[in-house]
Image (cartoon, coloured by chain):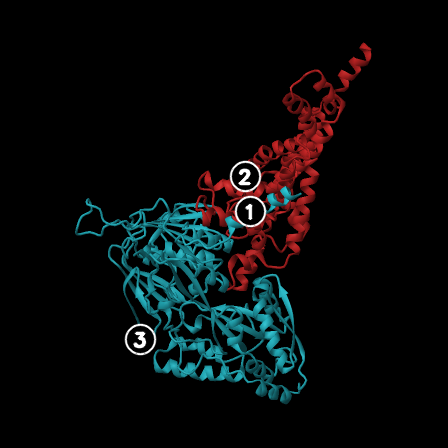
Chain colours: A cyan, B red
Amino acid sequence: MKKFLALLLALIMVFALCACGKDPAPAAAPAADAPAAAPADAAAPAAEQAAPKRTDLKVQMGSEPDSLDPQTNNTSANTLVTQNLYACLLTHDAEGKAIGELAETWSYSDDLTEWNFVLKDGAKFSDGSDLTADDVIFTMERGIELAFREDFALFASVEKVSDKEVKFVLNAPNALFEHKIGDIPILSKAYVESGADLTKEAAVTSGPYYLEQWNIESDLLLKANPYYVGGEPAIKEVDVVIITDPNTAIVAFESGQVDYVMGKASLTASEIETVSTFDNVEFIPAPEASYIIMSLNFQDEYFSDVRVRKAVDLALNRDYIIAVLGGLGSPAGAVPVFPGLGGYVEGFGGAPECDIEAAKALLAEAGYPDGFEFELMAPSSYAKEMESIQAQLKEIGLTATINEVADSSTSIGLFKSGEYQAGLIAVSIVNGDITGLNILYDPQGALQLNHNDKNDYGDAILGSVAFIGAEREAMLKESYEKMEEVIPYIGLYWREGKKACTADLDYGVNNVMISFRFGTMSWK
Amino acid sequence: MWRYILKRLLFVIPVMLFCSFVVFGIMNIKPGDPGRTALGIKAPQEAVDAYNHELGLDRPLLVRYGDYMLNLLKGDFGNSYVGGKEIWPQIKELFPNTVRLSILSIAFSLVIGIPLGVLAAVKQYSLADRISSIVAMILACIPSFWFCLLLMMAFSVKLKWLPAYGLSDWKCYILPIIALSSNTIGTIIRLTRSTMLEEIRKDYVRTARSKGAKERTVIYAHALGNSLIPVVTSLGSKFTGLIGGSVFVEGVFALPGLGRMVVTGINNNDTPTVVGCVVLISCCSVLINLGVDILYAFLDPRIKAKYVSSVKKRKAEVAA
């Protein structure tokens, strides 16, 4: 018996030794087969750096793209890859300002209905073929035919002025067209017409990389485009490794098998805590143009009353919700703007101060001094937010019953049909402007988040694109004031994420508009 | 024997129909809109409806199921709802990885499990027996998900001996195989030990010993074969489980396999992908069980004798 116990203890100790204890070994070290940054030896040229820099990069992604066709699917996994494969006429700099990528210059008519773009000399695809106006026109016509993205509905026609110049004639004046056009990747007419399946092939691309190989459920190998108009990238080869399990991703990062890690989509608070214990790590802020709101059904007996909506708005402490999420986020109010976003007007965008007494008074005035019960609906990914909201609203007498639905498409279905009382949803901004938030307008009614809120402030915000400068600001200010008065939904917080990379990597341009661009990354 | 095999092969059809119908039904009951999932949250509703119509998703369930099965019989697994990619090429690329891992896991389990089980039986109540039993118990109880992470922490992070993900070279197979085979090794050790203990007490073993056969010959040439029949039965179900159930291990080690494909399909409401994979797994299940039954015949001649053809039977009666 004693021998038996001794043996058992020995086995347990062996397991414990393997699994436990801090190892001071450096984490996120370069891969074993990559050239190390060794000290200079006698053979190295004196004028050059002592050791060759790495030219490869291993990046972890949390989900695999399902299509690489930039005109038929824009899930985040797809976009993360296609934005590195295809170039647009315009892009954005570090401050979010529009700059030319394939376009050398661009101009517009006084009434903002005609836009001219002149392509850069030497613009080529990855196979060396010239990128001309024909490719731009082909791209636009294909986009119109596929009718997937609403951006293609903006222009009435696109004409070839010369081999290097195209003219867009818009359906209506639009000061933000340079942002919209900057989101349309340019395809090779010859490549597409040769029968290439863009959902899985991208051998001829306009961007800094082309797709060399795609191993399903494994990885995508991107190679640098030597003809890229912005110059061949410093990173010549990118291996985008698909690791869906966040724990495995962290382990791979710690052991140096990947250089850049994002967990599932960005690192959670606990993952950040774990990664921060590793050596040689740099965190990459991942500002997300994603705004979490609580939509209230205007047809509901309770939430149709603006006093009730205001009461809910005042009762919620956004900092508390963000703290529950590990501090990844910044408070938001009814007006979805922040400094740097197109359409920002000073004095708007913040969340109201939490005031329980004022909230209770408003509820009493509305006829609900004892509160009421309602259902709060959202996918399970919002469980923490829902629990936090449930706890806070209890203080003013509101009892929220949580209804977790399967996924976002289910919740959207409920929003559309009006079969909900309150629900949480994330809404994204596209094109760096408030008009890119589709909760403000939806001609097709796909996202009637507050169900039947027929409002004019949304129309006014949309209409502001026909104006520039002070005139636009005045229009927007009026709309924002109306929104703060009406409370069309409860703005909760802006998502902020973090990714991580080895400190030896310069992760390049990184803001709300431009991030995860391998072409701007390099080894230090 | 051939008639028996043919009968069992025909059994694939009802199994495949049943499994595919159940999964098809469940995928259709599951909330979520494939068109919305495929086109994204911002797509106009008309585009989503057109997409769903193009895929035939607005037709009755039985009509869709019938169409799907008719195409399947022609070898067409259809296209994924998401991205429109053909499903068969994806299965062709991923399935061999899953099969390879399963076969290697089974082989590893046998190489470790059988000798330990035999040792435990032959040296009953000795230290070797106790160690084998403890090891078997621990391995049978360890949750595979937890074990994967433990192995990863030990060998990828702390020791940096082995990679944590992928299948890019032979080293990548080691940790997943150990993780996959842990439960199976535990089962084989215990099963081999108990069946071997029964066999070595039988008269024919005593006879062999009394005739002066070497102990090694008695154990491995005489007793082991008979004691492996329950082990083979167990392996059959384990192998089937590995083919269809290595989801955790494939997910943790980021292995490109069928399990991951199924999970991705479920998350994307991609019915053709999920049903296609399930049909394949159910076919494999039937074939594996058939293989196990055939293996019985070689292990135990009494079983083979049951399937002597009627012609041979009649000849034997006439001769008698």
Dot label at residue B101: 2
Query: In this rendering, is residue B209 above or below A48?
Result: above
Name the residue carrying label 1: B249
Above or below B155: residue B35: below
Chain of residue at mark 3: A
Q: Chain of mark 2?
A: B
Amino acid type at mark 2? Leu
Which residue is located at x 40 percent, y 62 percent?
A283
Task: Decide which of tag 1 and tag 2 comes sooner along the chain.
Answer: 2
Q: Position of residue B20 (x, y in %)?
A: 66, 45
A184 up-or-down from A447: above or below:
above
| Number of numbered markers | 3
Foreground of the two, B36 or A38: A38
Residue A107 appears in which quarter of the rendering? Answer: bottom left
For the point 57% across and 68% down, which residue is it? Answer: A384
Do the residues at pointers 1 and 3 share their chain?
no
| Disc 3 secondary structure class | loop
